[in-house]
Image (tube, rainbow, N blue to C red):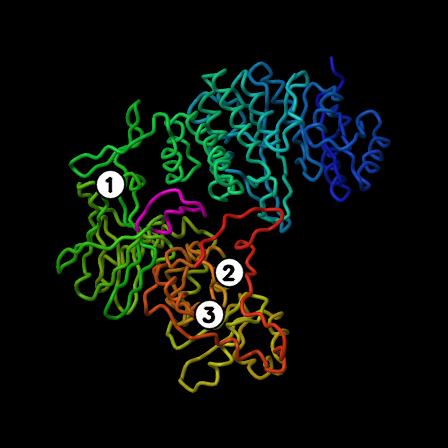
Amino acid sequence: MSSFNISVVIPVYNSESTIRATMESVLAQGILEQAIQVVLVDDGSADQSGAICDEYAEKYPKNVQVIHKENGGVSAARNAGMDAASGRYIMFLDADDLISEGSISEIVTFFDAHYEETDLVTYTLIYRYVNGKTWKHWRYREYLTKSAVYDLTTPEAAQIAQVTMNICVKGDTKQRFDENRKIWEDQSFITQTLAEKKTLGYVRKAQYIYVRDGSSTISQFHYPIFCYDLMMDFYDEMLQLKKEQPSFSEYVDSIILYNIAWRIKSDVLLPYHLKGEAYEEAFRHFVKIIDGMENRHIMQYKHMDSPHKYWLFSLKTINRPVPKIHADGVVDLVDKNGLLEKDLPVEIVITKLVLEENSLHLLAYLRCNVLDVMDTVRLFVKTSVGEDELSLSESQYSYYATAMKTNTYYVFSKSFSYPECEEISFYAELNGVRFSADIKAVARSGMDSSIGRNYMNCYGHAVWIDEKKLHVGKRRHAFVVRRLTKEVRLAKRYPRQFPKRQVLRLFPKRGGVWLYTDSNDSVDNGFWQFLHDIEMQDGIERYYVCTKKALSLMPEGCAEKYKEHFVPFDSMEHKKLLLRADYIFAAFVSVRSISPFGGGYVNAYRDMFHFKVIYLQYGVMHAKIPNMYSNEKIPFVDGVVCSTQFEYENLRALQYRDSDIFKTGMSRFDLMKKKELPQTGQRILFAPSWRSNLVQTSNRVQKPVARF
């Protein structure tokens, strides 16, 4: 019988800055009292990692073993550690991560109690960032909620998708890591280990602390140019496992879907680096994977957006689901085995709503997940003055939550005058059958149906959604009730932001203020526009919002001359001025460069402000970037400055009205002093974009963008 309760295998590669903290977290478990063996595998480190490992071996010779080997990758290192391990159980820890105090004792006690029930035990994975914030994966909020052994053949547990190395296995396991895999070696090892008993043990009190530096950048090895064939090989392995273990089918499909879901959102799924027949062949391999999954499993998977599921369905060549339209205006999704989804929603989604004194302007799109297979799609709007057919074009939301096209939705814009818009409804006609459309609104519109914020007000008018109708009218009792109901929902949805909303209500909201802003630590178009406008004597209060660093970048004398008009970004004064602002002139239009409320602004605060944002796009946009500039998707832009006719035409195609576009010419050229221009020789008339997402680089191949 083993003298060690458990062996902790730690692969080490150039980890001199983190390995001590990792080891101290293991030592804090009480390695002598708990009979813990630590196997440190120095995988050919070029720094002092190996020497540090030797220090611990010298200090704890009975419990710490060091293996020095040539670099062979993490799988080879883990296998070497497993071969040297002599504990009753084996767990794994990366050399830059930690485990919480008492975790090993909890894991060993649990595994001893459930030894015959499962071959693998997991425990809570905590993401810890350098700023101290922590985050817990959804699997611990929705599935693994208590210490227990979970049956992975049940529909609920089948979606757990254990893919990370916060695991413990039996010491006598024959399973090893595939040393030929650069990635997915962990998922393969875990899934193959689970396959025999099809159960997963979970210890709630133990914690694996995954230390992250705050970067959201995807490792280059996750891009298809580096891993597409490896990805397909892994999916092939999973499909083969399904054939061998039919009762494990839904869990295995969930593993594949877990990987595909985030890859769709990040647009790192398809092999864009390949061309012609090579691409087609690679894509056919992916379609083969989709054909190998059951429609029911795809539909029931909770952690993939519904439009992305329908994209997968559209690729199928075997048992492809099809819509079934009923004469009474209902559409279902069916396959040869029966009903997959009943009564698919046909929706009008409002993305922008402009409420003015005498008019209402809507920008919205028609959404139903089967529009791309319809022969005819028509849309009608009904008001108090009659019914009109709307002109439709493809919406940028056809690229749903991703840069790749997944569906076909249709955008439209429509302006209404009062009082014709007191009651508005929409009807879609799909293959000749009429459907009464539901009406939804996204947060950037000022309303937000996801939290019940189905109203907004401006110029003394109120707009609200009531079932399948959009109403515009004067404020009244019912409107007040809706507002109170919405505030209760906001308090529950955004408990941290809600008190700030109440404080903001105390400040005046009268207008007469224009704000100018650049990216937080820069001096750009916003500043130069401010300098131009500040001399105007028109009764407008003007302020430039900036950081201390931006002040230091200004031309000499400006910081002192206009100090009364400079407002620190993120200050209380900044927030109060936003309530009074009529316009914000911005060189950058990310939420963070405009709003001091960060990413929560659009959802938690948008309805409290009524300013319009003018995007100071001085220069020439030489590429079509609809995901960045489309009026449908940009969080809040009410006007755009442009310099050329083809920019104007492109912006019109991106759903900007003529009144939203300001033709100004290349006004920034006046900053170029004549003496700084070359007097002879060649001059640059055109320079490629500096945006990394528009150019190819040596370590990542991007999809080519459309050109003019």
Residue depicted at 67% across the width and 35% down the height? 99
Nearest-to-viewer mark from 3 and 2:
3
Where in the figure is residue 703, as x and y percent of width and height? 50, 48
Residue segment shown in magenta:
395-410
Residue assigned mark 1: 375
Q: Residues within 10 Å of mark 2 (few under 14, many from 20)?
A: some
Q: Which is more N-terminal, label 2 or label 3?
A: 2
Look at the image and say whether residue 467 sits in the magenta stretch. no
Measured in 3D between alpha carbons, the distance from the residue under mark 1 to the one under mark 2, in whole angstroms, is 42 Å
Horizontal and vertical percent position of residue 306: 37, 39
Q: Residue furthest toward the top? A: 1
- Mark 1 or mark 2: whose residue is earlier in sequence: 1
- Name the front one of labels 1 and 2: 1
In the picture of the structure, the residue carrying the numbered disc 2 is 592
Q: What's the amino acid at mark 2? A: Arg
- Secondary structure found at label 3: loop
Which residue corresponds to the image point at 54% horizontal and 70% vertical from the top-left? Answer: 685
Left or right? Give the position of 665 relative to 388.
right
Label of residue 616 in the image? 3
